[in-house]
Amino acid sequence: MTFKDYISEGIIVPTKIKITTTDIKKLNKIFKDTIIEFDYDTGEHGAYLPQFNKIVIYITKESPFSIIEALIQHEIIHSIQDKKSGMRMNKTIQTEFQSMQDLMDEVDDLDDDDEIDSYILVDLMKKYNDLHTKAKYLNDEERMTYAYMFVKLRRNDDFKKVINKANEDWYKWTKQKMNKKMMKYFYSYWMVKDSL
């Protein structure tokens, strides 16, 4: 196996798409025969909802087309990952959500009449934030999709600047460096950047 084959093994490269409008009525009409739906929100974000086999993309009227394309493809990658893993993602999402809900229930169960030890509350909130960060970023599925987005959105820039910015953003979000697997995803997407 050549190095190029090794490095690109395992990534999911979604079909290239071209967005030319931020009108959600038009977008929903264009994507009506797919699992993708659009709605307006105060910012851009998306969600793959495995229990409904649906992708929801939230945008503003000012959203850049490249961001919309990247969000759609990010969530499409998740849907493919889910199918390849035997629909494991839905179970993982439910488990992570339940863990976060259990912590919030623990906070709610603290007796309001008693003086709550601030260390207990801080510890519970830290655990909650750690679970949230892990669910949102620190799993192989998310590492792949974020590596994809770093490359997709900056593929015309200098490689060194892109990797430095990606590392900086990843650390800001997770307080961790990109691990070896994520770096492999990053390099793999960089090799096929023109097809993203």
Image: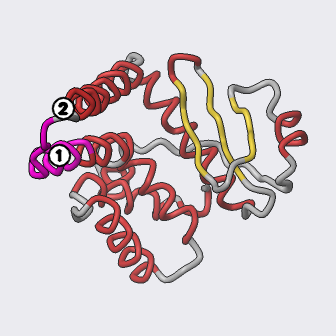
- Label 2 or label 1, whichever lies nearer to me, is 2
Image quadrant where one finds the C terminus: bottom right
Which numbered circle lies on residue 3? none
With respect to residue 161, does 72 lie above or below? Answer: above
Relative horizontal placement of residue 77, taking residue 124 as reference (left or right)? right
Viewer-closest of 27 and 58: 58
Relative horizontal placement of residue 147, taking residue 43 as reference (left or right)? left
Mark 2 to mark 1 CA distance (whole Å): 9 Å
Q: Is mark 2 on a helix, strand or loop?
A: loop
**Where is residue 25 drawn, in percent x and y?**
89, 39
- Kindly identify the amino acid type of the residue bearing the numbered disc 2: Leu
Q: Which of marks 2 and 1 is nearer the N terminus?
A: 2
| Coloring scheme used | secondary structure
Q: Residue at x 29, y 67 (%)?
A: 171
* Residues at marks 2 and 1 touching, judged by CB atoms closer than 8 Å: yes
Q: Which residue is drawn at 27% across and 30% down?
A: 108
Q: Which residue is drawn at 68% across and 26% down?
A: 35
Give the quadrant of residue 33: top right
**Where is residue 10 drawn, in percent x and y?**
37, 41
Image: magenta residue range: 114-128
Dominant secondary structure (helix, strand or loop) of the stretch shown in magenta: helix
Q: Residue at x 34, y 74 (%)?
A: 168
Task: Decide whether residue 140 is among the magenta residues.
Answer: no
Q: Is mark 1 on a helix, strand or loop?
A: helix
Which numbered circle lies on residue 121? 1
Which numbered circle lies on residue 110? 2
- Kindly identify the amino acid type of the residue bearing the numbered disc 1: Leu
